[in-house]
Image: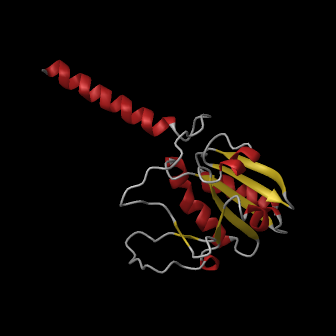
Amino acid sequence: MQHFRHLFLYGFIAFFTLATLGGCGSSKKHTSSKPKSNNTSSKPKTSPAGQGVVKAKPGAATSSTPMPAESIGVLNANSGNFKQIAVDSKKLVMIDFWATWCGPCKMISPIVEDLSKKYKGQIMVVKVDADRSKDLADQYKVKMLPTILFMRNGKVVDRVEGVDQNPRAALEAKIKKLM
């Protein structure tokens, strides 16, 4: 009986470790055609025009009316509006390719949103769900998530793949260098 408990525990630890480390940081593509969802989804809401990411602060009361994109400075882009939002921009554009199932993407999301507020008016910050816009992920050779591209005048000028030990400092250094 004791042996069975140990096997169960080791199996659970192995499963959890593989599930946590296997998805986002590997070079394998996510093969699910649709991200898993449940009633307590942490998926960001979008404005009616599909342009802005709205994320409630922990402990804050939420309403059913989404905030306009301009109030938080992050735009949601997809295959249909990416050219208009990111490629045609005259500003430096920071593009965060993410997915709902990606733990490191969830970790870096608040940092990206904070940087969009800090550099509001100086740079444009765009988020692209790699699962919903696979053609964009393929076009920009996104092989791991999160991948953050820096674009100027429609050309990729720099990129960050994965999460650094100090992602805020790394992203801010890139922004300052490219501005």
Q: Position of residue 113 (x, y in %)?
A: 59, 66
Quadrant of the image containing the N terminus: top left
Q: Position of residue 70 (x, y in %)?
A: 64, 78
Say whether residue 129 is visible. Answer: yes
The relative height of residue 17 versus residue 149 in the rendered view (above or below) is: above
Residue situated in front as seen by the camera: 11 or 47:
47
Quadrant of the image containing the C terminus: bottom right
Q: Position of residue 71 (x, y in %)?
A: 60, 79
Total numbered badges shown on the rendered structure: 0
The relative height of residue 113 versus residue 62 in the rendered view (above or below) is: above
Q: Residue drawn 57% across and 75% down? A: 47
Q: Quadrant of residue 116?
A: bottom right
For residue 136, side relative to residue 179 (left or right): left
Q: Residue drawn 59% across and 67% down? A: 114
Say whether residue 140 is visible. Answer: no
For residue 123, side relative to residue 97 (left or right): right
Q: Position of residue 98 (x, y in %)?
A: 59, 52
Residue situated in front as seen by the camera: 110 or 16:
16
Picture colour scheme: secondary structure
Q: Residue drawn 56% across and 55% down? A: 108
The relative height of residue 35 versus residue 16 in the rendered view (above or below) is: below
What residue occupies the far top of the structure in this picture? 3
What residue occupies the far left of the structure in this picture? 1
Q: Residue drawn 84% across and 60% down? A: 152
The relative height of residue 77 versus residue 5 in the rendered view (above or below) is: below
Residue situated in front as seen by the camera: 8 or 47:
47
